[in-house]
Amino acid sequence: MSAEPPTSTTSIQDPEVWAARTKIATLAHLMFERRLTDAAGGNVSARVGTLVCITPRFAGSRRQWNLRAEDVLVADMEANIVEGKGDISREAKVHFRLHHDFGHLGTGVIHAHARNVLVFAATATPMPPVLEATRKFGEIPVVKYAAAHSHLLAENIAAAIASQQARIAGHAAAAIAPYHGLFLIGRDLDAAFDAVERIDNNAYCILMGKQLMSSDLLAESRAKMEATILDFEHSEKH
């Protein structure tokens, strides 16, 4: 799936369209299994030329992300469905805005309710990189609040991505919508999926690291363990 701007209308019969629909179905379910999104929402899309393949509305709440390739919708760049049954997600506004604005840099867009990232969304907290694997994404910014499904949310996410768009061609650029979740665009769908998991792992490390640094590393329990073992070893010798 090339990131180059399309020069002619893409046919629905193009083998790359079916390949994209198949990969989206596979990765969407994998995201759900790995708790990178939940039943409440999320979306996965990939641009193939002048077409966008995207997960349908209610893919999580009604299908638990058990999608087949034919369940993935195909739309033109104006979000008009040209193939597939069902409605397009209301959150598709962000996807199509990112495909419009940054399609020359990347083709894969993901909105995720990743479990650990949601803590940062719930607290409207930007996320710094703490792992070598996430340095390339820089600090993940939190955008100004806008209602889910709104054009304003799409504008806010696009503005945040625009300030770091050089990261897209290298891997991906991301932003956090407060009280909502993660949005990102990658150079392709594989890069986008990989970025979601790296960013969620980064969030986990921050959250667990804070617990570790504020604890006494279970000093009382460790002391009890050592005493119990020493007592046992002493009794074994006598």
Image (cartoon, rainbow, N blue to C red):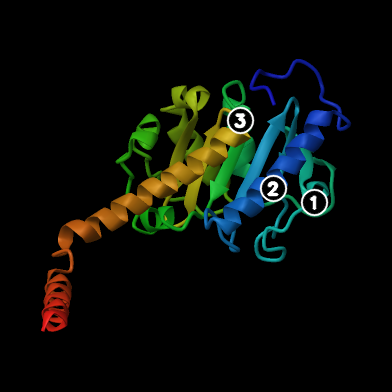
Identify residue for label 1.
Answer: 71
Q: Residue 5 has which mark?
A: none
Q: What secondary structure is found at the residue carrying circle 1?
A: helix
Q: Is residue 121 above or below residue 47?
A: below
- Could you say which is closer to the camera, residue 156 or residue 191? 191
The residue at the point 39 percent across, 59 percent down is 122
The residue at the point 83 percent across, 30 percent down is 15
Q: CA distance from mark 2 to mark 1?
A: 11 Å
Kind of residue at disc 2:
Thr
- Could you say which is closer to the camera, residue 23 or residue 53? 23
Q: Is residue 91 visible?
A: no
Q: Is residue 228 above or below residue 106?
A: below
Q: Residue extending furthest front? A: 238
**Which is more foreground, mark 2 or mark 1?**
2
Kind of residue at disc 3:
Asp
Q: What secondary structure is found at the residue carrying circle 2?
A: helix
Judge left or right: residue 118 versus residue 55: left
Identify residue for label 2.
Answer: 26
